Image (cartoon, grey):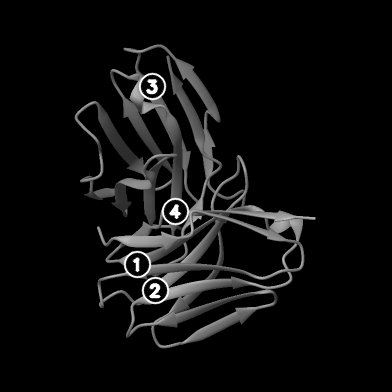
Amino acid sequence: DAGVIQSPRHEVTEMGQEVTLRCKPISGHNSLFWYRQTMMRGLELLIYFNNNVPIDDSGMPEDRFSAKMPNASFSTLKIQPSEPRDSAVYFCASSLGTGGENEQYFGPGTRLTVT
Amino acid sequence: GENVEQHPSTLSVQEGDSAVIKCTYSDSASNYFPWYKQELGKRPQLIIDIRSNVGEKKDQRIAVTLNKTAKHFSLHITETQPEDSAVYFCALASGYALNFGKGTSLLVTP
C-alpha cells in the first residue's frame, strides 16, 4: 500500500482564493482525520470522518472551512475564501477502526501558504 | 479535547546520552498513549505506544513509562544518535480522537 496520499504537496495562493486539499486514505481504513499544524498551535484536529460520515467537525475554525468524503477512498478539505492566517501544514490521517486507540497513519501533508 | 502538557519544548543532548520527555494529562479515562516522531518536513509517525494496563514498554533504544495514578507518561531514548533529532509528540486517546502535546524538539549533537 502506498500509504495515505495527499495532494498537492505545496500550495501557494492569494488571499481570497479558494483552496482545495485532497486525501486518499489507506485502503480498508474506515476513519479519516484532517489536522492542521502550526508552530503556535501544534497539531489540531479539524474534522473526523467514520465510514465516510462526518462525526465531529468542532475543530473546523469557521465557516470558510468545509470537508467532504464522498466515498471511502477520497476526501477533500476546502477553504473559501482563504486568508493569510490559514497558512499551515494540513495533514490527513487514516486508521482502521473507530476508536482513538487505533494507530493513525499520516499523509505527507500539504504546505499551504496564503499571501 | 483533553489537555496534554508536554515538557520540555526543546532538548539538546550529546550523542550517546539519554533523553527523557514527559507528558501530563488530567482525564483519568484515557487508556492509550502513543508517541509520534516527526522529522523536519516529514509526516508524524508512530514510534511506540502504551496502554493503561501496562506500566512500561520498551523497543530497542526507546521506552515509554506510564504512571496512571500520577497521570503522566514519559518517553526515554537511550544511546541517542544524530538521527534521533526530530520533534516528538505525545498523545492520548480521547474517545475517537487523539489529543497531541505541543511537541519536543530534540537535537542530538555529535
Q: What is the chain letter for disc 2?
A: B
For marks 1 and 2 on the same chain, the one whose residue lies earlier in the sequence: 2
Q: From the viewer's perspective, is residue A26 above or below residue A78? A: below
Secondary structure at numbered mark 3: strand
Q: Identify which residue, A40 or A27, lies in the foreground.
A: A40
Task: Tell me which numbered mark, 3 or 4, is placed earlier along the sequence.
Answer: 3
Q: Amino acid at mark 1?
A: Ala
Closer to the camera in the image, A63 or A26: A63
Q: Residues within 10 Å of mark 3 (few under 14, many from 20)?
A: some
Q: Disc 1 sits on a residue from what chain?
A: B
Q: Nearer the viewer, mark 4 or mark 1?
A: 1
Q: Which residue carries the number 1 mark?
A: B93
For residue B87, above or below residue A10? below
SS under mark 2: strand
Q: Mark 1 vs mark 3: same chain?
A: no
Residue type highlighted by circle 3: Val
Circle number at residue B39? none
Q: Is residue A108 toward the left or the right of residue A18 in the image? A: right
Q: From the viewer's perspective, is residue A50 above or below residue A38?
A: below
